[in-house]
Image: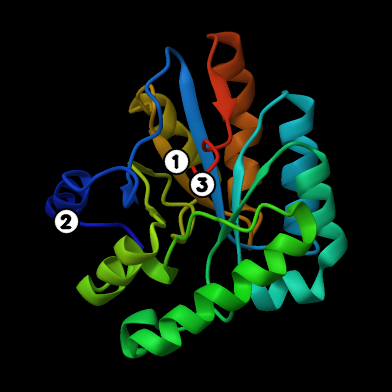
């Protein structure tokens, strides 16, 4: 889901420890993020592609899919990528009460901790839906929400070559967090075109920084 610019700008005014909209603006740095996995067909293809280009990324995983495909989560961690929390069941988050929302988050935290032992993860709400009550609850718990600053639009029914051309024509800026998904083949097809071009111009593809304790 694409955030309205006014909403993204408003979220960007909040402290980064609460809402992360952009990554560190190191020269040439981009932060690829993938939602909705792991997927038995599409995630391995993405991991192969990232490995070929020495790229790192952050994977915001759905707890139910983590339970179904633990070997893929092990591979994500082993290859140097970061784990993120994308809820347990990917529900319509705005339709849940706060207690149910927190249960979705905490259940997935526990699952992810079995793979990397970190225990504290950035959370990206399904479809970008976040309520003031959830923001307040997170602030009290000292944890943050991860959004994005550049939407690849890979969830739209548009040809991957068209979306790649858009990325080339309107490239992400240094520090941009790029929203992508690994529940279809679209993101891999886009990146097959873009990763060689980015690497040739000195772009560094990084995972999001670790959450501070």
The picture places residue 101, in percent across and down from the top left corner, at 42, 81
Q: Is residue 161 left or right of residue 63?
A: left
Measured in 3D between alpha carbons, the distance from the residue under mark 2 to the one under mark 3, in whole angstroms, is: 28 Å
Which quadrant: the N terminus? Answer: bottom left
State yes or no: discs 2 and 3 in contact (Cβ < 8 Å).
Answer: no
The picture places residue 117, in percent across and down from the top left corner, at 73, 54
N-terminal label among 2 and 1: 2
The picture places residue 146, in percent across and down from the top left corner, at 41, 52
State yes or no: discs 1 and 3 in contact (Cβ < 8 Å).
Answer: no
Q: Nearer the viewer, residue 90 or 15?
A: 15
Residue 38 visible within the image: no
Mark seen at residue 178: 1
N-terminal label among 2 and 3: 2
In what element is the residue under mark 2? helix
Classify mark 3: residues with Cα within 10 Å, few (<14), some (14-19) or many (20+).
few
Name the quadrant containing residue 174.
top left
Q: Name which residue lies at 32% across and 52% down.
A: 18
Q: Which residue is mark 3?
A: 213
Measured in 3D between alpha carbons, the distance from the residue under mark 2 to the one under mark 1, in whole angstroms, is: 17 Å
Q: Name which residue lies at 83% across and 42% down.
A: 78
Mark seen at residue 7: 2
């Amino acid at each position: 889901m694409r955030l309205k610019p006014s909403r993204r700008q408003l979220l960007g005014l909040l402290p980064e420890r609460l809402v992360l909209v952009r990554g560190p603006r190191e020269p040439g740095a981009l932060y690829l993020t993938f939602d909705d996995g792991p997927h038995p067909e599409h995630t391995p293809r993405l991991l192969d592609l990232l490995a070929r280009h020495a790229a790192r990324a952050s994977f915001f995983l759905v707890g139910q899919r983590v339970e179904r495909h633990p070997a893929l989560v092990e591979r994500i961690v082993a290859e140097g990528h970061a784990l993120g929390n994308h809820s347990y069941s990917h529900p319509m988050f705005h339709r849940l009460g706060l207690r149910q929302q927190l249960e979705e988050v905490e259940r997935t935290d526990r699952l992810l901790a079995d793979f990397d032992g970190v225990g504290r993860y950035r959370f990206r709400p399904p479809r970008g839906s976040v309520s003031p009550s959830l923001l307040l609850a997170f602030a009290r718990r000292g944890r943050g929400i991860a959004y994005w600053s550049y939407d690849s639009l890979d969830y739209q029914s548009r040809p991957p070559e068209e979306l790649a051309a858009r990325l080339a024509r309107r490239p992400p800026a240094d520090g941009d967090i790029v929203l992508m998904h690994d529940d279809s083949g679209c993101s891999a097809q886009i990146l097959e075109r873009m990763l060689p071009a980015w690497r040739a111009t000195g772009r560094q593809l990084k995972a999001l920084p670790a959450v501070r304790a």
